Structure formats: structure tokens, C-alpha cells
Amino acid sequence: MEKKDLDVLLKEKRVFKPSKGIVEDSNIKKWMDEHNIKSYNELLEKAEDHRWFWEEMAKELEWYKPWDDVLEWNPPDAKWFIGAKCNIVHNALDRHMKTGVREKIAYIWESEDGRLRRLTYEDLYKEVNRFANALKRLGVKKGDRVSIYLPMIPELPIAMLACARIGAIHSVVFSGFSAKAFAQRVNDAGAKIAITVDGFYRRGGVVPLKESADEAIQNAPAVERLIVVKHAGNEVAMKDRDMWWHELVKNESTECETEVMDSEDPLFILYTSGTTGKPKGVVHVHGGYSVGVYTTLKYVFDLRGGDVWWCTADVGWVTGHSYIVYAPLMAGATSVMYEGAPDYPAQDRMWEIVERYKVTIFYTAPTLIRMFMKFGDEWLKKHDISSLRLLGSVGEPINPEAWVWYHQMIGGGRCPIMDTWWQTETGNFMISPYPVTPLKPGSATKPLPGIEADIYNEDGKSITNKGGYLVIKKPWPSMIRTVYGDPDRYHKQYWSMFPGVYLTGDMARRDEEGYFWIQGRSDDVLKVAGHRIGSAEVESALVSHPAVAEAAVVGKPDPIKGEAIEALVILKRGVNSSPELKEELRIHVGKELGAIAKPSTVKFVNDLPKTRSGKIMRRVIKAKVLGEDVGDISTLANPEAVEELDRAV
Ligand code: PRX
């Protein structure tokens, strides 16, 4: 698209109305008809009775025993579908064995080097059962934690589903995290079993993940066994506690009974960054999470029989948990799973995949959209991507320019974009359009039915047309139940600023028509290429380097990644600053946390602004980095540090 065309579209405050065909044919329209609901607004109104709404949604799944009551709400503790018995794997796999879905492809998997695997629902069912039996043989029981450190290969969903099937709690750690980050999460979860891979492909090379797993497990003494998937074929040193996955499952039966779980029994722990140096283990449960993720995918992305769904996230993040593993399987969908870099070997890799598998629904992050925009439209012209009928965006705010490009160039002007706002803690989409919703570029539109979101000022008053704290006022089935091992942190972090109301950590604005515009985080959490990283985590990684005395980290707007990490570092006395040291510190953070957390810039300073109690004031640093007014600095113990910042930035 020509720049001038884009400018025209941007100036137009156009609302993109869905076509009549899309509306009439949509899953949500059918649902509304069945419930005698005439319009979307009527649906939103009716769903203010959130118990009614979520109970209707829960009826779409199979339960071993139905609930006695829908919700027990003792703020901030919620229990959904009280007394019900279920297992998410029953809905994701078992129930399909009785229908035609059994022969359908569950995953089309492609590796960076072009290897292909197609798993039907029946294949997946059998592989999951074999691995579940193997875990049982190793002594894994209901409630035990299993840490999974795997890349985007089919064994990752297989391992997750096998844990869930036998009632064990999985804790997946993104394979891009460092050994240290993995060890910290294994220890926090108290896992006895860990699962990894020999290596995986990235940009033509092999990442030897087993080496990181070994390093981690040296510092995780409770781990009894490390199960290793043979994938890249790189040489690995097997230790006494190590077992090859393929040998472990060789003689296992392809049938394994599914554990009957209580609706509120934990399904998984997923670590995410907060405002302190220690990540939070977000706990989700079988019942409510099943209902939430399944129905949001079905109605937001309008999933149906012939669709080929591609969510480009990594399964190591919540987007992958909810919308590559659990929801699409519950929906009996065919998903694409890709292991590798999106622009390797060339910048049209993604479009090649869309064309090859005739992807119909494509769900990705604004960072990638902006990257493709930068690559230029000629890469797109090489491929027929007209199979697409719906698009999605997640993870960070999408700027209207990228939205319009995505809509025109990828969506051919015909595919609506579902900009889905949600979080690790929320489990499923919260603020998002349905395909029937008129769209405004850059807005995630309105809270979904059954979700009551609001914008509060400092005093907890609801405000319109001004930026404020994004909050959720009623519980929802797939909400976080607790922070693993730290219920106090759960209460304090999310429910204390406005008692009984869930604090999202985001700032947002609502316009006169009730559309929400997400502005970004209000806390010290960064969003780099859609990845969630705590400033405090990066700071403690920097301070662990022998040359560093103190460090402060802030986010700086980046045209592609949304935010880039800027680190300000005070060196220890006697250490000389040099460009080499800057690079060494960046590498050090990569080793401590993972490559995604590497600062894009490191600057050396002699002083950092602090309060009288010695706390670094990130707010002041951020204002300086952004070239904004620093505001009130009367509480600073060292106002001269502000001048020092001027010099540095
Ligand atoms: O700041 C919001 C941003 O991502 C945060 C949640 O990050 P995480 O738990 O890693 O989950 C990401 C995938 C669901 C939110 O607090 N965010 C997520 N989706 C959007 C978004 N910001 C703007 N628009 C979105 N659609």
C-alpha cells in the first residue's frame, strides 16, 4: 500500500462495520437466535447477569457431574461450577473419539527446516495416553507439579495434556528463558519431574536446550527425573536421572483413564512478570478455565468445522496455553503449529505457511504486524493468502497505522480484526470484538458479555474519556485463582487498590460509545515485542554482574517492538566504563533471564534519582528518557541526579 493511501485511511475516523454475510452466518448470531436475543447490545445487557451467561456457556461442554451452584464469591476468592466434576482433557480429546473429529487433523506442525508432522485427534489421544501412562509409572500423581521446558514441537501440547489427564499440574516455561529463570520456576513449583529437548531450530541453527536444562537442574535438587525429547539430533550428555521420551513411552498403552477432577482443581501454573524481581505463578483450574477459553475462541474467532486456525504465539506463554492447546482442541479445530523464526529463511515465511495450509484465521501480535509492514508489500504479493477470513491481534496495543495495514494488506479489506485484550491472569479474552462488532482501529472495542470492565480514577470513581485504571468488577470463570504458594501476593497485587475489584495493571480510556482504548501498563511491567518483562527482574540481573553497583530499567517506545528496554547503570567504584562492558552487560542479562530481556541500550550514570528511603524513582527516569516533564521531584533525596540523567540521556 502506498504511504499516501495509508495516510488517507488514518485520517478517516471510520468505523469498520462487519459485512452482512459475516454477521448473519456467525456463531454468536446463532447463539443469540437460540436465546431469543435480538441485538449485540441486548446480549451485553442480558449478560450483566454473569451467572446466567456463564452457566449457559458451561452447558456447551461435557461434565462428568454437573454443578450444584454456578458461583461462590467471597472477594477476592471465586469458585465456579461448584461441585462439578470434569477434566479439561475429556473435552479436548476424549469426547472427540466418539465423533468424526477423531479422524480430523488436530495439528499441522512444520519446523523451520521444513519437516512436517500431521497429528489427527486420534493420534494425539494415543500419544497423550502413552505419555500419561509413562508419567504414572514414574510415580506422578494428582496434584504433583511437572515443569516443562520445550520449544514449539508437538510433544509440548502432548506433555501438557498428559499431565492434565492424570491430574498433575503442569508448569510450562518458555524455551527462550535462561537456565536460571527455568531453575527459579522449577523450584517455586516444587516439581519432581522436568521435561526438555535435546535442541531446537532457530534461524538455521540448533539451540542446545538440554544444556540449559542440565544447568538449571543442578540448582533444583527436588527434580528426580529429566525426560528428554529427541528432536534436533544434536549430541547430548545423558545423566543417570535422564530418560529419553521415546524410550519411556515405547511400551506404554494407548489407553489411560482420565482422572476425574473437581471443577476447582488446579490445571496449571504459568509464571508471569510482576512489579518485583520474583515472577508470579498464576494458577488456573480445570472447570472455569475450560468454559472460558473454549467459548471465547468459538464466539470471538467464530471457529467452525472447516477452519484452519493459526495462532503464532509460543505455547510457553498464556496465548499458546489457551489458544494453541486447550481451546482449539476443545473446539475440534485444525491448528497450524510452527517451530522457527517468522522471517526465516525469508521474509515471506508466514505467508508461505498461510498459503500452503490455507489458513482461514490468523492470530498474531502487533510487533510482528509492524515487522511485516516494514519488510514491504512485495513479500505478500508472492502468495495467495485469500483463504483468510478473520484476523486477530494480541499482547500489546496495536497502533491504527498497523491495524489499517493488517486489515488492507493481510485481510484484503474483507477480514475483520479481533483485537483481543487479556492477560495471563484472565485466562481468556476479556475486551474484544465479536465478528459482529463495528471496529475502530486501535480499540479492543468492548468488554465481552459476562465481563464487567471499567475505568477508575485514583479514587475508584468510574470515568469516561479520560485515562485511568482498567479494572474488572465481577469474577469470571477463567480468572486466576491464586499466586502459587503466595495467596497474600494474590490479594495484595490484584485486589487491594480497589477492594473487591480486580486491578489489571493497565491504563485505558473509554470513549462515549463505550469503546476501550488500552494505553499500556500502569506499573513497572514492560511489554517488549508483546513479551511481559518486569523492570525489577532486569535490574536484579544487572546488579548480579560484578561490575554493577545499581541499575534502573525503563521502557522506551520502539516503532517495531512497542517498547525497548533502556538500562541505566551505576558501576562499582574503580570499574572503568567502556562500550565492551555495555555489551557484556547486555549478554549477562540474556544469560540471567533470556534473550528477550536483553536491554537495547545500556547507559552509565554516576547517580540515579532516589527517594529519602533509598528507592530508585523509575517514574522520574522514565520521564527523562521520554523527554517529558519530570513532575514533582520534591520527595527526591538527590535532585542533582536529575541533571545527571540529562547528561546521560
Ligand atoms: O498490557 C496488556 C497487554 O499485555 C498484558 C498482559 O500480558 P500477558 O499476561 O503476557 O498476556 C499477553 C497475552 C494475553 C496486558 O496487561 N495486552 C494484551 N493484549 C492487549 C494488550 N494491550 C493492548 N491491546 C491488547 N489487545
Image (cartoon, grey):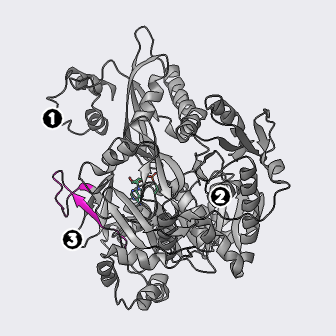
Question: At 41% across and 68% down in the image, what residue appears?
Answer: 5
Image quarter for residue 235? top right
| Nearer to us: label 1 or label 2 | 2
Q: Which residue is mark 3?
A: 512
Pointers 2 and 3 in contact (C-beta within 8 Å): no
Q: Is residue 497 left or right of residue 156?
A: left
Position of residue 301 measured from the top left corner of the image (x, y, whole percent): 50, 73
Tell me, for residue 632, which label it has, or none. Answer: 1
Report the residue that reaches farthest toward the right. Answer: 251
SS category of the residue bearing label 3: loop
Pointers 3 and 1 in contact (C-beta within 8 Å): no
- Amino acid type of disc 1? Asp
Q: Earlier in the sequence, mark 2 or mark 3?
A: 2
Position of residue 561 measured from the top left corner of the image (x, y, whole percent): 46, 48
Q: Earlier in the sequence, mark 1 or mark 2?
A: 2
Image quarter for residue 502? bottom left
Image quarter for residue 441? bottom left
Q: Is residue 354 magenta-colored?
A: no
- Amino acid type of disc 3? Glu
Q: Which residues are magenta?
A: 448-469
- Let me know if residue 309 appears in the view: no
Q: Which residue is mark 2?
A: 166
